[in-house]
Image: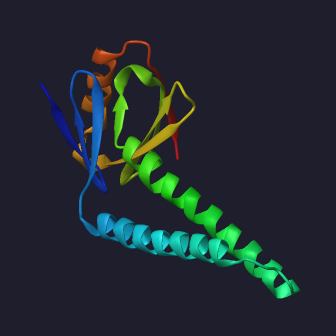
Amino acid sequence: MTYKYILVDGYLEIDNEKISFSKRSDDSLKKRNRSSIIITIVFIGSLHYLIKINTLHKVKDYIDVFLSALGLLVAAYSIYYLVFKKVWSKKITINTINKIIIKKDDYETEVILKLLNKREKELNFRTLENQVEPFIEQLKKRNSRIKITHERV
């Protein structure tokens, strides 16, 4: 059985083993696709330029190679971040949750899930919808080792 919750910026779904996240609008997907295209163009351009250089005669040539290599590194890290970090962060196994920190505000309640591998996932619920307590209860049913702490903002 799956349970669905509404976040400020998306949706949350819990089944017996994992938590899945989805964004409310396709705006973030469009931005991610646009940035992926730009990063790919920079990556290919930098790689092409590094391969094209045969001789280095002037200081300008060395600066161009350095800037191209720097652009190549930034593009490679950005591709890693967009592909691996973003995709893998959409699903969390419930057994890997170690601690939950709840920060309650007048309008929003921030829930921070701390995982065993030291990663954190921040969830923002609307306080007036009262979905935080049922969400915490569902997590406690599936993983009784979770430590819960409350903080007032």
Between 105 and 96, the one nearer to me in the picture:
96
Residue drawn at x 55%, y 28% is 117
Task: Identify the image quadrant of residue 69.
Answer: bottom right
By what rule are the colours in the image chosen? rainbow
Between 14 and 74, the one nearer to me in the picture:
74
Q: Check the image and report above or below for 30 versus 130.
A: below
| Percent x, y of residue 14 | 23, 31
Location of the N terminus by quadrant is top left
| Percent x, y of residue 148 | 46, 24
Residue drawn at x 60%, y 73% is 46
Residue drawn at x 62%, y 66% is 72
| Percent x, y of residue 123 | 39, 45
Is 137 on the left or on the right of 66, as rendered? left
Q: How many marks?
A: 0
Q: Residue furthest front?
A: 54
| Percent x, y of residue 94 | 35, 24
Task: Identify the image quadrant of residue 93.
Answer: top left
Q: Check the image and report above or below for 101 versus 105.
A: above
Q: Residue furthest left?
A: 1
Residue drawn at x 87%, y 87% is 58
Between 73 and 107, the one nearer to me in the picture:
73
Q: Check the image and report above or below for 90 versus 16.
A: below
Is 107 on the left or on the right of 68, as rendered? left
